[in-house]
Image: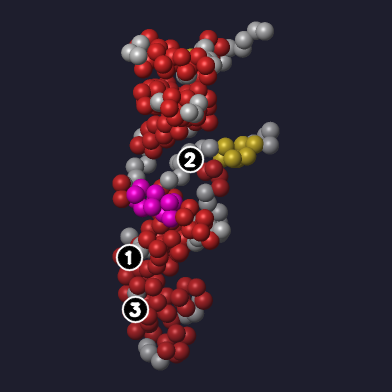
């Protein structure tokens, strides 16, 4: 049967030898005895494993050759640390290590730089989310996670968002065979777009300003009352309402800056 040529990262997969489990066991035994040629054979015999892991990332990086090199580093680390006493197939042991190297590279070379503190909070939030989900058989809310970690809802939301992959504004999201709709086409509408981060940030800021300022801003911008209506309702002058509204807005800006 003819072999089809498929090239990934400049490597012709049809020319890659795939080792059987028995062959790998024998090579690991030789490697343990100091045979460095066995190590080379193990690397070459598992390149297809690296390429299979890289396949889903084909459209997420401009340089697959670099990613292939990173995957090979993960493969070499797996070979160096593998022990036949693990009693598992080498591929089972190697996949998480290779994948870890690939994800670390993509994260550290992301065009959007995320601070270490935000990353740490994100991983704490993910770990806590998994624990609470297992305990309660349902996913916790952002508010519950924030309360457990002793931070604001906005900080948790912002941290979790940082783990998501960046997407190009020109990423096609729909194609019916005619005109292509890109992500950039959906980023704005006449009604405006309010994302979750903005809502959580505003909600948190409103809680921190003075009660009277909070009431005036809520009634003015969410209910739609005029300054005159509020002045009559509260029993103060329109000028005082205007001053309180201005102070409230300035305080909000400082809190969500």
Foreground: 77 or 115? 77
**Residue 122 counted in the magenta span:** yes
Question: Along the horizontal axis of the image, is 232 left or right of 116?
Answer: right
Which residue matches tag 1? 255
Real-space CA distance between mark 1 and mark 3, rounded to the nearest whole angstrom? 13 Å
Identify the secondary structure beneath mark 3. Answer: loop
Say which label, 1 or 2, has the lower sequence index: 2
Residue range of the region highlighted in magenta in the rendering? 118-128
Query: In the image, what residue occupies the spot 37% across and 68% down?
Result: 205
Would residue 217 appear left or right of 175 to someone viewing this image? left
Image quadrant of residue 197?
A: bottom left
Residue 40: % across, % down: 39, 13
Instruction: Report whether residue 203 is seen.
Output: yes
Q: CA distance from mark 1 to mark 2?
A: 29 Å
Q: Position of residue 180 (x, y in %)?
A: 62, 37
Q: Residue furthest bottom?
A: 235
Badge number at residue 210:
3
Say which residue appears at 37% left-offset and 80% top-offset. 211
């Amino acid at each position: 049967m003819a072999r089809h040529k498929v090239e990934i990262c400049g490597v012709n997969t049809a020319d890659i030898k795939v080792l059987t489990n028995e062959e790998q066991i024998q090579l690991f035994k030789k490697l343990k005895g100091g045979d460095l040629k066995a190590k080379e054979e193990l690397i070459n015999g598992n390149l297809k494993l690296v390429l299979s892991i890289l396949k889903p990332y084909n459209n997420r990086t401009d340089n697959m050759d670099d990613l292939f090199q990173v995957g090979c580093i993960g493969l070499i680390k797996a070979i160096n640390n593998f022990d036949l006493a693990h009693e598992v197939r080498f591929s089972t042991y190697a996949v998480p290590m290779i994948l870890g190297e690939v994800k670390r590279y993509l994260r550290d070379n992301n065009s959007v730089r995320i601070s270490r503190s935000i990353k740490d909070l994100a991983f704490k939030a993910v770990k806590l989310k998994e624990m609470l989900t297992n305990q309660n058989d349902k996913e916790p809310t952002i508010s519950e996670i924030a309360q457990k970690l002793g931070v604001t809802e906005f900080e948790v939301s912002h941290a979790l968002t940082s783990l998501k992959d960046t997407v190009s504004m020109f990423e096609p999201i729909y194609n019916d065979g005619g005109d292509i709709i890109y992500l950039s086409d959906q980023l704005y509408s006449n009604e405006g777009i309010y994302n979750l981060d903005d809502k959580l940030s505003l909600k948190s800021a409103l809680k921190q300003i003075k009660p009277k300022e909070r009431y005036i801003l809520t009634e003015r911008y969410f209910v739609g009352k005029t300054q005159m209506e509020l002045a009559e309702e509260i029993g103060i002058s329109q000028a005082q309402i205007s001053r309180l509204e201005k102070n409230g807005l300035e305080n909000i800006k400082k809190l969500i800056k």
